[in-house]
Image (cartoon, grey):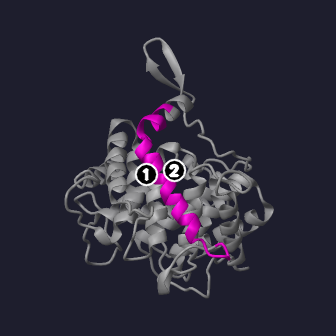
Amino acid sequence: MAICCGMWSSITPAVAQSPSPQVITPLAESAPGKITPRKDLIEVNAKKLLTPATDASIAKGLDFLAGRQHTDGSFGSGSIYRRNVAVTALAGMSMLAAGNTPGRGKYADHVDKSIGFILKNSKPSGYILCEESPSHGPMYGHGFATLYLAEVYGMTLRENVRTALKNAVNLIVGSQNPEGGWRYDPDGKEADISVTVCQIMALRAARNAGIAVPKETIDRCTEYVKKCQNSDGGFRYRLEPRPQSQFPRSAAAIVALNSAGIYDGPEVQRGIEYLLRSPPNVEIFQFENHFYYGHYYAVQVMWQSGGERGENWYTGIRDELVERQSPDGSWPDSLICTEYGTAMSCLILQMPNNYLPIFQR
C-alpha cells in the first residue's frame, strides 16, 4: 500500500539528481521589495558557515577516510567494526555530501567501491549484513546501508541499486514490531528509539527516491516514538521501565518525527527545548560515548528547524569538531571506530551544503 497523506502523500518516480542543492521552497524574502530564490539563500548560508578552516577540516577528514578504505570497498576497523556495513554507508555518505558520485568528483572511485561492497552484502531476503564482520545490533547497519542505497539510487538510477533498495525496504516494513518500532534483529520482537530512527530515515530516503512505503508503517512508528517521550521533553530508550531521558536518543527521536513529516507540534517543540539545554560548546559533555551519534542527529534537528537557532547550533558544533580533529584528519571514537567518528564529523560539518535529500526539510 502506497503512502497517502502528509509528507508521504505521493510516491513519485525517481528522477536523476545531480549532487547540487535542491530548492526546498520556491521563494524567500531577502529584503524589502526583493525576492531571492531559496537555492540562493542556501548557497549564501553555506558560504558564510563553511569557513576556510571548516573546508580544510572536511578535506582532511575525507582524505583520511579515502586512505582507510579496504580493497573490497568497505570501511571500519577493530575486531567488531572492521568491514561494517553501517560504517561503510556513513563513509560513503560523507563523500556524497561533498558532491562526489560514481564517475564524478575526487572520491568517485571510493564511492563506487563502497556501493559495490553494500550490494555484495545485500541478501536475497533484503537483509544487508556482512556475515564475516557481525556486530552488535545488525539492524543499525541495515538501516544506514538502506539509507545510503536510497541516496545513491536517487543520484544514479542504477537498476541493481534499486533492486537491493526495494528488498531492503521490504525487510524493514516486514520486521516492524507490534509497538511500531525496530530493534537489533529483524524478528519483530522488540523495539528501541535508536534502531527505530535508523529505519525511519531509511524509509524516508527510499520514499524520496520513488520506492513505495506503507502509510501504516509510518503511522505506527510515529506513535511509538511519541509514546517514548518523557515529561521533561527528552526521550527514553524503550517503553519499558527506566525512563531516563538522554541527549543522543532524544535528538534521534526528533529526527524520526521529522522523517515522518512532523516538523512542528508539541512533541517536537518540547524535544527541541530539551536539546537546547545541552548546547554543543559546553565545557563538559554528558554523553561522550555517543558524542558523534548525538550531534549527527542534533544538527539535523536544528538545521531543519531553520533560522538563527539552526545557524547558531551549527557554528557551535562546527567549531567544536574543528578543534577536536586529530592532526591526521581523523576524529577518533573509542566506542565504535575512528572511521565512524570521522564520517559522522564530516557529515555534520557539511550540513550547510544541502546536497543530500535526507538532510533537507
Residue 343 visible somewhere in the drawing: yes
Residue 33: x and y, percent? Answer: 47, 11
Secondary structure of the residue carrying numbered label 1: helix
Secondary structure of the residue carrying numbered label 2: helix
> Range of the magenta residues?
44-73
Q: Is residue 75 shown above or below 204?
A: below
Residue indicated by mark 2: 359
Residue indicated by mark 1: 300
Residue 189 visible somewhere in the drawing: no
Q: Which secondary structure class fits the magenta region best?
A: helix
With 323 as the anchor, is 72 left or right in this view? right
Q: Nearer the viewer, residue 93 or 270?
A: 93
Residue at image position (55%, 52%) is 358
Which quarter shows the N terminus? Answer: bottom right
Q: Nearer the viewer, residue 280 or 35?
A: 280
Q: CA distance from mark 1 to mark 2?
A: 7 Å
Which mark is first along the chain, 2 or 1? 1
